[in-house]
Image (spheres, rainbow, N blue to C red):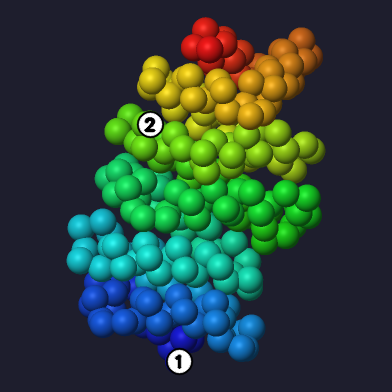
Amino acid sequence: SAGGLTNLACDGTAEKMGNHDGLLTTLAEVSVNDTNREVQQRAALALTKLANSVTVKMKCWGTLLDALIKASQCKYADGIVSAMFRVKTRVEENRTSMAKHPMLLTTLAQMCLQSEDSEPSSADHKDGENATKAIAHLANDPLNHKLICNEHILAALVHGASLGGQEALVTRDAAILAMERMAMEHSNRPMMARYPGMLVTIAKATEREMHEELNGNPVSSATGQPRLAKPLLMSLLVAM
């Protein structure tokens, strides 16, 4: 039946299906609790396909976010749930409601932290990268800067920015970018500066960027992101 729902889900049917009593919640529950791996995968796929067409203006928006938070616990989603968080946070009008939604920030942080020591091809690695990019998108909105500056998010960003290896490049850059945006809110800087590991992690990122600059790289990395670590470090040191 989850496969049938996947086939039915499209822009024209998403609102009606999303508003159907219990549908989104049931898909999320099945994606986590069903005893069959394939059924879990199909339920997660159906949920994310529906999510792709649900907008913030629909009545089912909050229920959808609850469902995605629950489905993030699915062991066999292969990164599609975290990718949906990333996709939804790209949309400017979604960002404030997502940052305020109960447990959403904590869920993103948990996805980031579970990527530790994971293989580059693993679902945990995909989840960590997607979740870090989602946090960076949320940090794009100045209205979210104070809201997302909490211990869960700071732990996730310090973790992401300190990952080693070329395969973690996107995650590292996204974490530094999110920190830089959060630090635009001056009142966030003392908390950020005092958070365990924050200054050391940013100092190491500054050193990486310095080596890249000395090697003649025009930008900080293959992601095209400008060098942000040094000015971020300076702004936090001044705030101590």
Q: Nearer the viewer, mark 2 or mark 1?
A: 2
Label 2 environment density (alpha carbons within 10 Å; few <14, some 14–19, many ≥20): many
Q: Is 214 rendered above or below residue 172?
A: above
Foreground of the two, 141 or 53: 141
Q: Is 232 rendered above or below residue 34?
A: above
**Residue 116: x %, y % from top left:** 72, 49
The part of the image, by quadrant, that contains residue 96 is top left
Whether residue 25 sits left or right of residue 17 in the image: it is right
Do residues under tags 2 and 1 come within 8 Å of each other at their CB atoms? no
**Which label was assigned to residue 144?**
none
Q: Hey, what amino acid is under mark 2?
A: His
Whether residue 26 sits left or right of residue 93 in the image: it is right
Can residue 221 be seen by looking at this rendering? no
Q: Hey, what amino acid is under mark 1?
A: Ser
Q: Is 4 rendered above or below residue 49?
A: below
Foreground of the two, 47 or 112: 112
The part of the image, by quadrant, that contains residue 92 is top left
Lower sequence index among marks 2 and 1: 1
- Distance, label 2 to label 1, CA atoms, is 42 Å
Instruction: Look at 40% across and 48% down and name the residue there.
Output: 89
**Residue 236: x %, y % from top left:** 53, 15
Q: Residue under circle 2?
A: 145
Q: Residue under circle 1?
A: 1
Instruction: Look at 28% across and 79% down and name the residue there.
Output: 17
**Residue 140: x %, y % from top left:** 39, 33
Can residue 88 be seen by looking at this rendering? yes
**Residue 71: x %, y % from top left:** 49, 69
Whether residue 186 sits left or right of residue 35 in the image: it is left
